[in-house]
Image (cartoon, grey):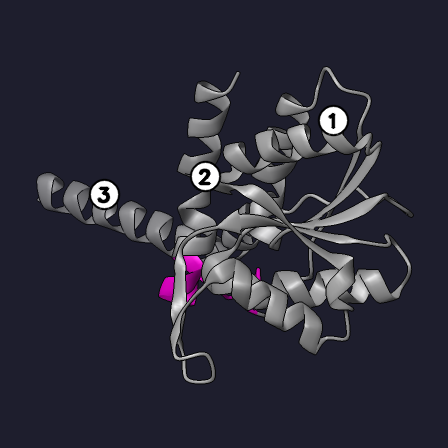
Amino acid sequence: MSFTISGIGHRRRVLSLAALALAAWPLLAWAAAEALVERRDLAHAAVLVVLSGSAVYKERTRWAAQLFHEGRAPRIVLTRDMQPGGWSKERQRTMLFYEREIEELERAGVPPERIEVLPQPVENTYEEAVALRDYAAGRAVRSLLVVTSPYHSRRASWTLGRVLRDSQIEVGVAAPPPGGQSPSSLTWWLRPQGWRAVALEYPKLIYYRVSYR
């Protein structure tokens, strides 16, 4: 009998802990998402930079266009993401994502002559930071306002800080609020896209901190 009572007590404790974890999960998930968001405001910069975002390029370019129209910078610079961005009926060819970004910026009212694409192809955030360092050095640019997605902002900020640490370049980081192409901080865990945006960002952040010290 004592064994049975002990077993029942153990199961109750397990169920209680499971219920507690289930109740706490939404708060923990929200905190995990918000911890990835970093904003470093810069009232005015020499250029706005849109980091490559592939499938989330619209939220980044639209936010950059908004900042441009607010007068935060006179130019917008794009990194050269060579990933294919889908077939264009209008152009009758596969567009690259940076070309999609140009279209989106122009659609948002940014003049074409105020848009510039860096020449070297990039494959990741670190390569983008290196390309921006070289661009800034070649043009004597002293300030950058970098636009990215909210859950990428902390890794982007850390990477830019590492690559540009020996320069005199002032760097700001701007991101739209979650809820657009990036899922809401409250409900990201209910969608596969949310797990890709939030949960998978943590291994990437750890990898960057280990690899690019």
The residues bearing labels 1 and 2 have C-alpha atoms spaced at a distance of: 31 Å
Q: Nearer the viewer, residue 85 or 152?
A: 85
Return the disc, 1 or 2, that comes first in the chain's sequence: 1
Q: Secondary structure at mark 2?
A: helix
| Residue with the mark numbered 2 | 202
Q: Determine the residue positioned at 41% across, 84% down.
A: 89
Residue type (three-letter) at the residue carrying disc 2: Tyr
Q: Secondary structure at mark 3?
A: helix
Looking at the image, is 123 positioned above or below residue 93?
Answer: above
Q: Where is residue 123 shown, x and y percent of the image?
A: 43, 41
Q: Determine the residue positioned at 12% across, 40% down.
A: 2
- The region drawn magenta spans 181-195
Question: How crowded is the residue under tag 1: few (<14 C-alpha within 10 Å), some, or many (20+)?
Answer: some
| Residue with the mark numbered 3 | 10
Which quadrant would residue 145 be assigned to in this image?
top right
Residue type (three-letter) at the residue carrying disc 1: Ala
